[in-house]
Amino acid sequence: MQSSKDILIVGGGVVGLASAHYLAQAGHSIRIIERDPSLGQSCSEGNAGMVVPSHFIPLAAPGVITQGLKWMFNPRSPFFLRPRLSPSLARWIWLFARHSTKGHVERTRELLRDLSLESRRLHVELSEQENFPLIQKGLLMLCRSEAGLEEEAEVADHAHSLGLEAEVCDAARVRELEPGAEISAKGGVWWPQDCHLSPGHFIEALRKFIQSKGGEFITGEVTQLAASNGKAESVTTKTGETYQAETIVLAGGIDTTGLAKQVGLNLPMQGGKGYSLTLPEPVANPQLCSLLKEGRVAVTPMGDSLRVAGTMEICGKNTSISKPRLQGVIEAFCQFYPQYQPSDFKDLAPWVGLRPCSPDGLPYLGHAPKLSNLIIATGHAMMGLSLAPVTGKLVADLINNAAPKINITQLNPDRFQFVGGNVS
Ligand SMILES: Cc1cc2nc3c(=O)[nH]c(=O)nc-3n(C[C@H](O)[C@H](O)[C@H](O)COP(=O)(O)OP(=O)(O)OC[C@H]3O[C@@H](n4cnc5c(N)ncnc54)[C@H](O)[C@@H]3O)c2cc1C
């Protein structure tokens, strides 16, 4: 085994924790600095818990901009771009538009497939090792319109060409696959390789493992990152404590951009705000998780409860809750699952999270340029939970100088340093 290193991880979301898991497993000494007293509060705990090899198309894809513009003026729509005068937003939009092409999808789909399949494998391994439930029944992409079903059938064809499993279903087949709840849909696509879990269970299992290996959790907000002579040296918190380390991993979600900037690294990101509501005693119990095509809503059974999540508001770091948009999520859910009424949600407190969204829809994963002991791991947008294990494993490979199983040069954190990234 390589020699044990003293490693500091900034961020106790799923990406920081999964990195800590694989690093602790490799025998390194781990400290995690997290701003919140409990782990995963920022974007990781309240998400929809889906593990999604079905998501081989990045967020930046053809049609997204046109659809987004159509939805811009509907206060209940699932997508919204909060207009404001901000050079970083303007640059992000410019980069996003440049990457929303067929060529970009073609260049990235194999990588996303490979990352997702490897991460799914690791999720299965982790759930067995750490003893938390991972439900391997697949995901239903449900469609209420003929046009929606046709679009999703095309995605399924595309998936087959990549060797992924996907079955186009009519309404009767959907009923057969989902005996737990009534569904009102024309049909959909069943993605048998997708899975779901409760993010809270996942986080708790990782925390326990890290602590069992002697990992330390420190509560504090890192405000300074110091580097000199080609090395990251230390971080300092808001309350003035300084921590030195041999290697530092930045896994601070949307806030990684600010820290990286201090060492001259430009990581363009916008928060993709989403909400979730968790019904503690659902009137019907779906067995499978689902995505509701026309409402862009995610539905996930979590033990005895049911989580309904949605919206993607490109909003910088604004965490205010839009009541009309939240209402839009609830109404879309009730249309697809008619046993539910909007009033079922009336006393529930919404959770809000900011997805760390890069402008090309790919994570940032790799060494910071010119600082050989600083690793960046963020930018997973709507796939952070799904890709957390493979990200953690790759972070460990980078630090262990082990050849990574997957070529991650496309995830280079430096890719937007001077130009508009790799586009055509
Ligand atoms: C509604 C919704 C549903 C989603 N559903 C899914 C899903 O089904 N499947 C999926 O794969 N993904 C899903 N996602 C996306 C997923 O939640 C994110 O991609 C993932 O949580 C990102 O994890 P992270 O660890 O990178 O960031 P975060 O969860 O944001 O964690 C970063 C951590 O770093 C800490 N931090 C930041 N800066 C500092 C600092 N300076 N000092 C100390 N600590 C700091 C923060 O407090 C935070 O805890 C969903 C997101 C939303 C909003």
Image: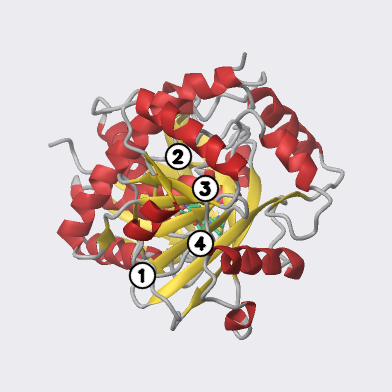
Q: Please, which residue is most extreme toward the right here?
A: 85
Q: Which residue is mark 3?
A: 382
Whether residue 16 is visible here, answered yes or no, is no
In depth, the one of 195 and 11 nearer the eye is 195
Q: Which residue is mark 1?
A: 180
Report crowding for label 4: few under 14, some 14 to 19, many 20 or more residues within 10 A (C-alpha): few
Ligand 1 lies under 8 Å from the Cβ of mark 2: yes
In the image, which disc is placed on residue 241?
A: 4
What residue appears at the point 59 percent right and 79 percent down from the top-left corner? 345
> Residue 226 location in percent, x, y?
54, 43
Q: In the structure shown, which secondary structural element does the residue marked by tag 1 occupy?
A: loop
Comes first in the chain, label 4 or label 2: 2
Q: Which residue is mark 2?
A: 55
Give above or below for 79 relative to 305: above
What residue appears at the point 57 percent right and 65 percent down from the top-left corner? 333
Ligand 1 lies under 8 Å from the Cβ of mark 3: yes
Mark in front: 4 vs 1: 1
Residue 275 position by quadrant: bottom right
